[in-house]
Each structure stands twice: as structure tokens, then as C-alpha cells.
Amino acid sequence: MSYELFDVDRLTVGAVGPPGRRVFLLQASAGGTVITLKVEKQQVAALSEYLSQVLADLPSTGDLPTDLELDEPADPEWIVGALGVTYDEASDRVLLVAEEAVAEEEEAGEVARLAATREQVAALAIRGVALVEAGRPPCPLCGFPLDPAGHVCPRTDGHRPPTP
């Protein structure tokens, strides 16, 4: 199902599950409609970075929203394949466009258009960075994530623990 929420009440990102197996979600609500979309960690990181750059070129924001936890149940409608961002100066809204990931042979998928205030987008960018940084730390040798149960480092052929 496609969505057009041109004045969102809430906009957030979140993650469910333990580090290494987290599922990242983009969630928006407007007028009683709540949509949850599955996104990749890299998409959250790239979106947060890009939104920060967009906001740097705009007038400073007011107070940021603080209610950024995901609404439950957080069951995703579909998986996001592409994200786009535009700014509408007339309405002073940032428009996020999320397109569903579909196989090449399929027709175009669903689309969600989410118009949010600069404050909502700033809060989303800050939360996105925090979520990405809260993941598993990288191995100092190979850069791959370190698992709590251990790490088979390709730089050591997996025969000894990584040493800085």
C-alpha cells in the first residue's frame, strides 16, 4: 500500500533485536495512521548524514521532538529499496520519499511520501546516528563487526584474537 502523509505527527527510526541481528525501521504517523517500513542500517546512516547536510543549509530549528520510540506493534509494511529527500520552501517541510524494494522483473512497488518539519527531521537524524553507533564495534584489524561470542578475523586467519 502506498502512503502520502503530508503533515506527519511523528517521524522516527528504531531498531529491534540484539546487535548483529537488529532490524531497522522507519516509522511515521499522521492523523491516526501509523506506517512502519523496514530499512537497512546503511540506509539509516546515509539518511541521517544527508539530512544533517540538508538542515545545515536551512534556518536553525526550534525545539526537537523527544518522543522517538517506535509505536508497537512495529511490523513493517514493506522493505525500502530507495530513499529520496527534497525540501519544499513554500511549506517549510522536508519530504522523504521511500520506495519499496522490488525485483527487477516486477512493476514499480509501493511508495511512501512523508512530509515532516525541520525539527522532526533533525530529531530523526540525531536518533539515526545514535542507533547506527550503538551497534557492534568494529574489529581494529579488519573492520568487520565484533560479535559478543567472538570474532574470526580474516587478518589473523581466525587462529588468534585480534590485537591492535
Image (cartoon, helix red, strand yellow):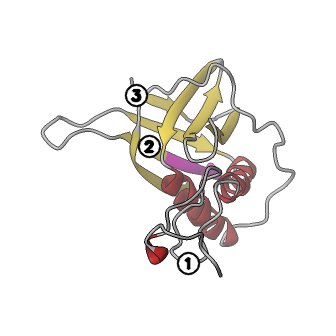
Residue at position x 18%, y 35% from top? 107
Q: Which residues are magenta?
A: 88-96
Residue at position x 59%, y 69% from top? 161
Depth order, front residue of 124/76? 76
Classify mark 3: residues with Cα within 10 Å, few (<14), some (14-19) or many (20+).
Answer: few
The residue at which mark 3 appears reads as 2
The residue at which mark 2 appears reads as 98
Q: Residue 47 in the image: state x and y as whole percent.
A: 55, 57
Q: In the figure, residue 147 lies in which quadrant?
A: bottom right
Is 91 included in the stretch rendered in magenta?
A: yes
22 sits left or right of 72 in the view:
left
The residue at which mark 1 appears reads as 141
Lower sequence index among marks 2 and 3: 3
Question: In terms of secondary structure, where does tag 3 sit?
Answer: loop
Depth order, front residue of 31/68? 68
Mark sitting on residue 107: none
Residue at position x 64%, y 56% from top? 136
Please give the count of numbered marks on the rendered protein.
Answer: 3
Is 58 included in the stretch rendered in magenta?
A: no
- Nearer mark to the viewer, of 1 and 3: 1
Tell me the kind of residue under disc 2.
Ala
Lower sequence index among marks 1 and 2: 2
Tell me the kind of residue under disc 3.
Ser
Q: Residue 33 in the image: state x and y as whole percent.
A: 60, 20
Q: Residue 85 in the image: state x and y as whole percent.
A: 50, 55
Quadrant of the rendering where the N terminus is positioned? top left
Vertical side of 104 occupied by 126: above or below: below
Marks 2 and 3, how far apart in space? 10 Å
Q: In the figure, residue 134 lies in which quadrant?
A: bottom right
Can see residue 129? yes
